[in-house]
Amino acid sequence: MAPALLLVPAALASFLLAFGTGVEFVRFASLRPLFAGSPEAGGPDAHQGWLAALKDRSVLASLAWDLGLLLLFVGQHSLMATETVKVWTSRCFGVLQRSLYVACTALALQVYYHVLGLGEPLALKSPRALRLFSHLRHPVCVELLTVLWVVPTLGTDRLLLALLLTLYLGLAHRLDQQDLRYLRAQLQRKLQLLSRPQDGDKAE
């Protein structure tokens, strides 16, 4: 009973994180930044601005590209998530079915980056960030270590698996002082951004 109770705070924390991410996405996708500087977001000036934008061929072409990219990503996800496609890919590719799904998702994102002229995603990162990525394992490895060790009992085979994978992750995780200084600077930058007053706070 006790181990099951320990899952309650973890599940609650996971829910709060997911809920907070959703709230942040709604705030980020809000239309308010589009009307920055206008006297009234819902006033006649904003309405005329929308009408003028929809009559501009370049705006319509950009919207068409955006719509196509969104449909590509959503369509790929939805189509490959259907039971029919899952059964077919499992029959043809076996255990690689999930890998094929991830590869197709990555391909859809690469098309998005290519159309926007962004190139390789990692090419947009700073040299310090690339150096950090070469030393730092993926954060999902923390979850893997939790799954490996937080169990009531460890059999001999499970213990061997946990030891070897922990050793592998530990050896691959080679952060040094320069990486730590970079992480500290990024943390301070994020804290400064979060501490800035929002537009609504200034008005109040």
Image (cartoon, rainbow, N blue to C red):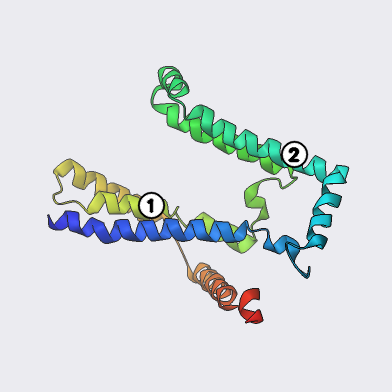
Q: Which residue is mark 2?
A: 65
Residue 20 spot, x, y in % from top left: 46, 61
Q: Image quarter for residue 195?
A: bottom right
Q: Against 17, is 203 above or below?
A: below
- Number of the label disc, if any, that sits on residue 35: none
Judged from the image, the secondary structure of the residue bearing numbered disc 1 is: helix
Position of residue 44 measured from the top left corner of the image (x, y, whole percent): 81, 61
Q: CA distance from mark 1 to mark 2?
A: 36 Å
Query: Is 84 situated above or below 129?
Result: above
* Quarter placement of the C terminus: bottom right
**Which of 111 and 5 lies nearest the eye of the viewer?**
5
Q: Residue at left 75%, top 45%?
A: 117
Provide residue 77's location: percent of width, then percent of height.
53, 34
Looking at the image, residue 2 lies above or below residue 104: below
User: Which is more N-terminal, label 2 or label 1?
Assistant: 2
The three-letter code of the residue at mark 1 reads Cys
| Local secondary structure at mark 2 | helix
